[in-house]
Amino acid sequence: MIAVRCQELTKNFGRVSAVEGVNLALPQGRFLALLGPSGCGKTTTLRLLAGFELPDRGKIEIGGRLVSAPGLHVPPEGRSVGMVFQEYALFPHLNIADNVAYGIPKGMDKKKRVVEMLELVGLTDLANRMPHELSGGQQQRVALARALAPQPALILLDEPFSNLDAALRQSVREEVRQILRLAGATAIFVTHDQEEALSLADEVAVMIEGTILQSGTPQQVYLRPARREVAEFVGEANFLAGEANSSHVTCVLGDLPLAEAAHGTVEILIRPEMVLLQPDPAGAGCVEHINFFGHDQMVQVSLPGGVRLQARTQPRLDLIPGSHVRVAVEGPVVAYS
């Protein structure tokens, strides 16, 4: 079952096109990251889904029900949508249990549901605490419990980890993913953090200048970006000029296999981790600079003709600035006309 569907969703603010022709279809129980740079329309799309903004064109279905279309606008409280805001928006005068209970509708056993939600997020012992007595990660889990409590068809999260310290971010991200999995929730979260999107989501939609350029699994978006703009934004990328002849391309690194058939003059994408370096005094590559990170390192290599490549390798003592290397590429490459 498709939990949320958008068709040609469009929103303008005066002459500024914030969202342009967005199409999305997210199956029930899946976790989608809406990934893009600041100002690309991610949060506006989230607000359109929640009902906080009215679209200029397009349709929105949530839980199989049409909630937005020309002449139709179901208000936020009628959409079966839970929202986790960037700043959490917990009620400071209510304890944790009462915060979670706030949105539970009549007809549902509130006390039982609060207990279930606090157990789910691991905060049973803190039910009587006030929000200011909790850490940022704990507040995040309370906000998520409150959003999940009414059993909405869709959970929306707006930059949910941006207020956390870097040391907390990774652990809280994993906690949130586990909570959503256990709840069987369908969720969409917006982020500009590529690592966050790729590591957390089942699907990633890359949005640039109000348009979704590609949607797919994290692996598809990273390894087979449909457009150069996607390849540039998602992860580090090397681009080399080449001449494609069906299944192969000829470039400064020689003859390389193509992921998909192409012909004529192209640019090829080579991710840094695809670049293999082997010390060789007669090698055509020269190590210019190394950024050492401990678990790996980024090596900048210059090639004949002024071409430069970034290579991500394991920490190695035999690579130093000024040394010469042979350069090879592992795996097929993606070409753009």
Image (cartoon, rainbow, N blue to C red):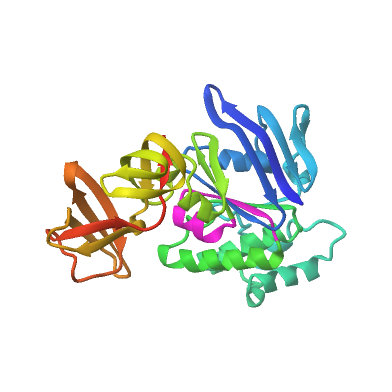
The front one of 315 and 86 is 315
Residue located at (78% from left, 31% from top): 72
Magenta residues span: 185-202
Location of residue 200 with respect to 74 vertically, above or below: below
Q: Position of residue 254 (x, y in %)?
A: 28, 48
Residue located at (36% from left, 58% from top): 330
Q: Position of residue 5 (x, y in %)?
A: 70, 42
The front one of 109 and 264 is 264
Left or right side of 251 for 162: right
Left or right side of 69 for 238: left
Left or right side of 72 for 140: left
What is the residue that sits farthest to the right in this orientation? 107
Location of residue 79 with respect to 97 vertically, above or below: above
Q: Position of residue 213 (x, y in %)?
A: 53, 39
Q: Is residue 189 magenta?
A: yes
Residue located at (63% from left, 73% from top): 123
Q: Is residue 207 magenta?
A: no
The front one of 237 and 260 is 260
Q: Is residue 94 visible?
A: no
Q: Position of residue 233 (x, y in %)?
A: 42, 45
Residue located at (35% from left, 49% from top): 256
The quarter of the picture where the C terminus appears is top left
Q: Is residue 219 visible?
A: yes
What is the residue that sits farthest to the bottom in this orientation? 125
